[in-house]
């Protein structure tokens, strides 16, 4: 049973370009979370999705950031017109639908570097 | 507002000695607390959680954590540290009433020297 898969592992973009980060949850998991880790900081919650639904996007910046988790395929975190401050490690996590206190399974992250 | 604090950026211990990584929390209502570990260039791995019940929670790799309601603490402990325990440790609290949305502490770098 493969774990949470994120790609790419490293993504380099120039200012103004778009970044697309992909996350495939563990098999059987229908809940996906995106977190951002800035240097010297802990992880910050961005968004919580279930299939075709955004449940909680309270951690998402108001502009340029969007996320989706379609019925088929991976979850996508999209950052438009990237700026240097977007440089960070972006982690996806998934959990089964069984209970709200289930542990999260994290992917290895995508390191986004904006030049 | 709910929050988690890890007062130590770094903890250094000698192999074989006991270790403690500190965590305090501030929540409204019952706390649901977690510890995760992050090895270099990897995602976080679950260590243990406290939901209810015994205040001493046992987890993976010989780690345990003690929930102390009066001190609002959830310190991570291990009786005998290994060099391989060297990693970044995060305490977290669940927020909201659905899903696994967590607020993480800033992390504590544990270094175990031979």
Image (cartoon, rainbow, N blue to C red):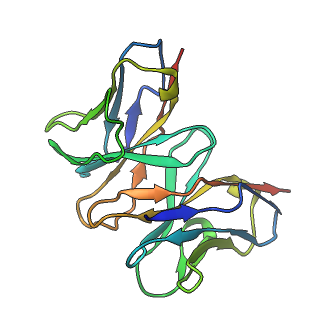
Q: Look at the picture and state if B58 lies above or below A32.
A: below
The x, y position of residue A37, in whole percent, is 52, 41
Q: Look at the picture and state if A98 lies above or below A81.
A: below
**Relative depth, front residue between B18 and A68:** A68
The x, y position of residue A91, in whole percent, is 44, 40
**Relative depth, front residue between A71 and A57:** A57
Q: Look at the picture and state if B23 lies above or below A66.
A: below
Residue at 28 percent across and 32 percent down: it is: A66
Task: Kindly tell me whether residue A29 is visible in this rendering.
Answer: yes
Residue at 66 percent across and 72 percent down: it is: B77
**Relative depth, front residue between A18 and A84:** A84
Q: Decide if residue B36 is on the left or right side of residue A95.
A: right
| Count of labels in the image | 0
Q: Decide if residue B102 is on the left or right side of residue A68.
A: right
Res A51 quadrant in image: top left
Q: Look at the picture and state if A112 lies above or below A48.
A: above
Q: Quadrant of the N terminus of chain B?
A: bottom left
Residue at 37 percent across and 63 percent down: it is: B95
Q: Quadrant of the C terminus of chain B?
A: bottom right
The x, y position of residue B23, in whole percent, is 61, 68
The x, y position of residue A114, in whole percent, is 51, 19
Res A53 quadrant in image: top left
Residue at 48 percent across and 39 percent down: it is: A108
Task: Kindly tell me whether residue A26 is visible in this rendering.
Answer: no
């Amino acid at each position: 049973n493969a774990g949470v898969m994120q790609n790419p592992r490293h993504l380099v973009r120039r200012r103004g370009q778009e970044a697309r980060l992909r996350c495939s949850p563990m098999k059987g998991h229908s809940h996906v979370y995106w977190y951002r880790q800035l240097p010297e900081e802990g992880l910050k919650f961005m968004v919580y999705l279930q299939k075709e639904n955004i449940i909680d996007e309270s951690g998402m910046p108001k502009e340029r950031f969007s996320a989706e988790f379609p019925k088929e395929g991976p979850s996508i975190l999209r950052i438009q017109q990237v700026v240097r401050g977007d440089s960070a490690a972006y982690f996806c996590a998934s959990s089964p639908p069984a209970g709200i206190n289930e542990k999260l399974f994290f992917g290895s992250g995508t390191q986004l570097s904006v030049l | 507002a709910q929050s988690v604090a890890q007062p130590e950026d770094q903890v250094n211990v000698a192999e074989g000695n006991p270790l403690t990584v500190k965590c305090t929390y501030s929540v409204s209502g019952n706390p649901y607390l977690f510890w995760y570990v992050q090895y270099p260039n990897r995602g976080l791995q679950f260590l243990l959680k406290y939901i209810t019940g015994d205040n001493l929670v046992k987890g993976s790799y010989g780690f345990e954590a003690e929930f102390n309601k009066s001190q609002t603490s959830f310190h991570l402990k291990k009786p005998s540290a290994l060099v391989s325990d060297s990693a970044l440790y995060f305490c977290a609290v669940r927020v909201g009433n659905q899903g696994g949305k967590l607020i993480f502490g800033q992390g504590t770098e544990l270094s175990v020297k031979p």
